[in-house]
Amino acid sequence: MTCNDCVSNMPSYKLSYFTATALGEPIRFLFSYAGIEFVDERFDYEKDWPKLKPSIDMPSYKLTYFDLTGVGEPIRLLFSYAGIDFVDKRIDKNDWPKLKPTMPFGKVPVLEVDGKRIHQSVAIARYVAKQCSLAGKNDLESLEIDSTVDTIYDLKANLEDFHYESKEQAKEEKLKAAKVTVPYYLERLDAQVKKNGGYFVGGTLTWADITFVALLDYLNHMINENIIEKYENLKQLQKKVEELPAIKSWIKKRPSTSTLYQN
Ligand SMILES: N[C@@H](CCC(=O)N[C@@H](CS)C(=O)NCC(=O)O)C(=O)O
């Protein structure tokens, strides 16, 4: 076998990515480290991408949810962070009775992936997180992230228990309980962020951080206060996540939902 044979047996590689470093750069580094030749195609996000995008075989996504920052919001933030386009279908409350029987389990959010409908917000968020490498570097990290997200949902359940109680006396008792359980959760979540270098898991951004920040608006609304006011590490985390360019731009452009929380 001659050297020419080796060369001709190598696959030819072409990497298409933006002019930015970001997610394309580790691949460029690895090709360079391995001494493997590749065509380094770079295009401009503003100028080239709108024309090129339709030619890239991406699934089409449609997320159906209420016009709220509830359990659909982590998914919207994750899509935005990942730079994945999705149809943000917001149901008018008045249309819900008619639409409910058409949903797989009578609830939203529902994600349509190329027309296939999937429900359960946490499962959907985890799926999107995997598309943009926010789901942990190994199984143990993924487990820690899942466990943190479940804890955030436990905290949410505590607040919902109080918020959606309609009987006055029971509501007062549930508020008293929430005033104990909510700090219990927040102290531990705050300590977790402190211990893990400013993020919930592994010293780096994961979908647990995005889930927490995305749900804060809803959690605060339920008890009518900023629940993380006293928790410096959680406040820093919120700031960091909300300042990520893609998240910042999502928050700026998303519809205002303030009037639709009323039950
Ligand atoms: N475990 C489900 C719960 C979904 C859920 O409770 N959705 C609410 C909105 S936040 C809903 O569809 N409510 C309307 C109804 O139950 O009729 C998830 O996380 O996706």
Image (tube, rainbow, N blue to C red):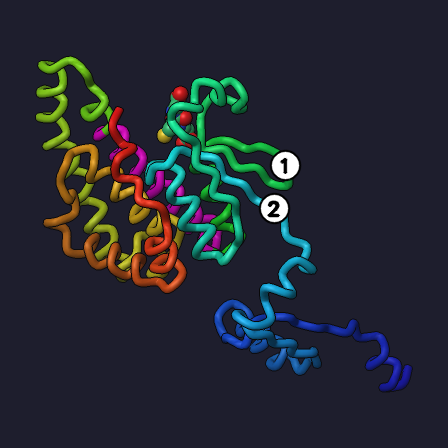
- Secondary structure beneath dot 1 equals loop
Apparent side of residue 6 relative to residue 157 in the rendered image (left or right): right
Q: Nearer the viewer, residue 166 or 195?
A: 166
Apparent side of residue 239 relative to residue 201 in the rendered image (left or right): left
- Please, what is the three-letter code of the amino acid marked with disc 2? Ser
Q: Which residue is mark 1?
A: 115
Region rendered in magenta: 134-159
Q: Nearer the viewer, residue 214 or 33?
A: 214
Across and down, in percent, residue 97 comes to 44, 18
Mark 1 is surrounded, within 10 Å at the Cα level, by few (under 14), some (14 to 19) or many (20 or more) other residues, namely: few
The quarter of the rendered structure image containing the N terminus is: bottom right
Q: Which residue is mark 2?
A: 60
Across and down, in percent, residue 185 comes to 20, 39
Query: Is-magenta flag for residue 200?
Result: no
Apparent side of residue 14 relative to residue 214 in the rendered image (left or right): right
Image quarter for ligand 1 equals: top left
Across and down, in percent, residue 32 comes to 61, 81
Q: Name above or below for residue 85 compared with residue 14.
A: above
Point 55% across, 33% down: residue = 118
